[in-house]
Amino acid sequence: MDNRPARRLRIFLRDFRMLEATVGLAEGQALASYFANRKSYVSLRAAHWTGTGDDVKHAVLKVEQVLWAASLDRDIPLTNASAAGAGRAVEMQLDGGLLLRGTLMIGDQQRLSDYLEIASPFVPVMDAQLLRSGRPPKKVNVELGGVVLNQEAIQAVWEIDSQHAAAHDTEH
């Protein structure tokens, strides 16, 4: 029997399916380190696939299939690292034509490429928004909030300034 506190997650998979499930995290464990420390699989309880309505008491999910994950109750920190600054606004091109905007906690003098090279396999992204997707094309923004993003699914990342982001939002 697992005695770790049960936490509810929303997990978006790389094939565009989504599920909600409960996982056992150590007290104070951050979401980024939880996924980074799983070798191949994550154990899920009370898993519910939102598209099909399928419910499973216990399942194991291959970690590499996770695109991003978020705490449903917002009770899990994304990272244990302290935020040194306001972070930097970025847009990220992901597998499947997805475009994600959010904030990465990068130091003022740190290069984006250096940050990503040393970051966890699951990168914490604050205030994440899904801008559009390719199946079918949409320009609707979906507010995701804080997520951990699987670096394996990132194709490209670029910094944006807040003015650009605000102008982009009013166009769509």
Image (tube, helix red, strand yellow):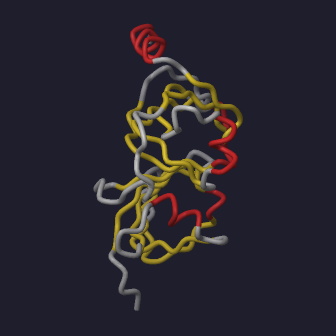
Taking the view exactly as shown, the residue that stands out farthest to the front is: 109
Q: Quadrant of the C terminus?
A: top left
Q: Is 27 located above or below residue 72 in the figure?
A: below
Whole-percent x, y for residue 93 in the image: 64, 31
Q: Is 93 located above or below residue 28 in the figure?
A: above
Whole-percent x, y for residue 63 in the image: 62, 63
Taking the view exactly as shown, the residue that stands out farthest to the bottom is: 1
Observer-nearest residue: 17 or 5? 5
Whole-percent x, y for residue 64 in the image: 66, 59
Observer-nearest residue: 163 or 146? 163
Q: What residue is drawn where x is 41% and y is 73%?
A: 25
Q: State which quadrant residue 5 falls in.
A: bottom left
Q: State which quadrant residue 128 falls in.
A: top left
Q: What residue is drawn where x is 57% and y is 53%?
A: 122
Q: State which quadrant residue 135 falls in.
A: top right
Q: Is 127 located above or below residue 136 in the figure?
A: below
